[in-house]
Amino acid sequence: MKPFATALITSFLVSIITGILIFTGVIDLKKILPEDFLSADGPETSAVVPNFVNLKITEAQKAASEFGLKIITEEKYVEKTDPEIVLEQFPLPGFKAKTGDSVKLIISKAEEVTFETISEEELKEIELSEKVIMPELTGLDLATAKDLLNKSGITSISENYEENNNIEKNKIISYNPPAGSEINADTVVDIVISRGVIIKQVIVPNLYNKSLEKAKADLEKSKLKLGTVTKVTDEDKAFNIIIGQSVQWGARVKEGTVIDLKLNAEAEEKLGW
């Protein structure tokens, strides 16, 4: 091969290899060429936008400067997220930008703490709202309970009544708020007072023309009590039957009411000399 051709091929290959080394960064022209050779007037350079998401803002700014990019920030509050963390970015990672271009970053910010102002009237209401401890009222009668509440500073009392077989009349069945509660002095306390034993009424059965045994059974079934049984004689009526009762049948009476009966019986023969 002629020397000229050999030199031409060698020069071509060197140019290709040099270009590859410069493109891949192995050869840094800034270090080889004079500073004024690559002036600002030269062709624009490009950079691939890195991923800034989840970096702290200081780390993102440092990375951006290395790529020749500028940072524009905007704050956004996100619950349960540390402050000064990159949440979003634009352009997205991998976008080709020119050196000196700006990248917008959305940065998390700390939760804002606001302080509400209280007016003088509201402050007075708070100061006047004295706290008191709810006393124990179990087993007390109404008069004693009200007196204890008043001495504790509680004057607003709502009284309610219920019949109760287990709690004596005029004694406290229940109350609210419960004992030991810290309440405002103007809180309304609800108390339930016993009316005493529940009085039930029953209907008196018709005992006429029944045997004494059947009359007793009917009285027990109606929750009534058998009183005095008086024997009388009325020959116009059958014997050994009830011909009278002290309370008219069909009447309403309290449970346990005593009912006296008249039993028609044969007259006993009087023996004499």
Image: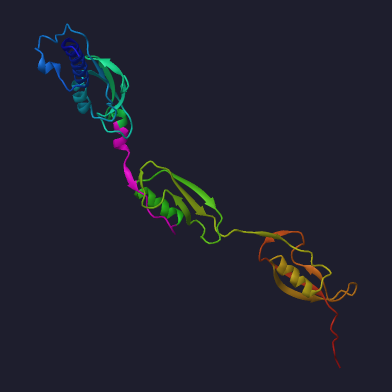
Residue 74, horizontal then vertical, whole percent: 28, 21
Q: Is residue 8 above or below residue 190?
A: above
Residue 230, horizontal then vertical, whole percent: 76, 75
| Magenta residues (range) | 123-140
Q: Is residue 239 left or right of residue 99?
A: right
Q: Is residue 121 above or below residue 267?
A: above
Locate residue 219: give its quadrant.
bottom right
Q: In the depicted view, which residue is nearer to us: 214 or 32?
A: 32
Quadrant in which the C terminus appears:
bottom right
Locate residue 226: give its quadrant.
bottom right
Q: Is residue 239 magenta?
A: no
Residue 3, horizontal then vertical, whole percent: 16, 12
Q: Is residue 31 left or right of residue 228?
A: left
Query: In the rendered view, how is the structure colored?
Result: rainbow
Q: Is residue 154 above or below residue 223?
A: above
Residue 221, horizontal then vertical, whole percent: 72, 67
Q: In the depicted view, which residue is nearer to us: 188 or 234?
A: 188
Please, which residue is most extreme toward the right here?
Answer: 236
Q: In the depicted view, which residue is nearer to us: 139 or 35?
A: 35
Locate residue 20: give its quadrant.
top left
Quadrant in which the N terminus appears:
top left
Q: Is residue 124 magenta?
A: yes
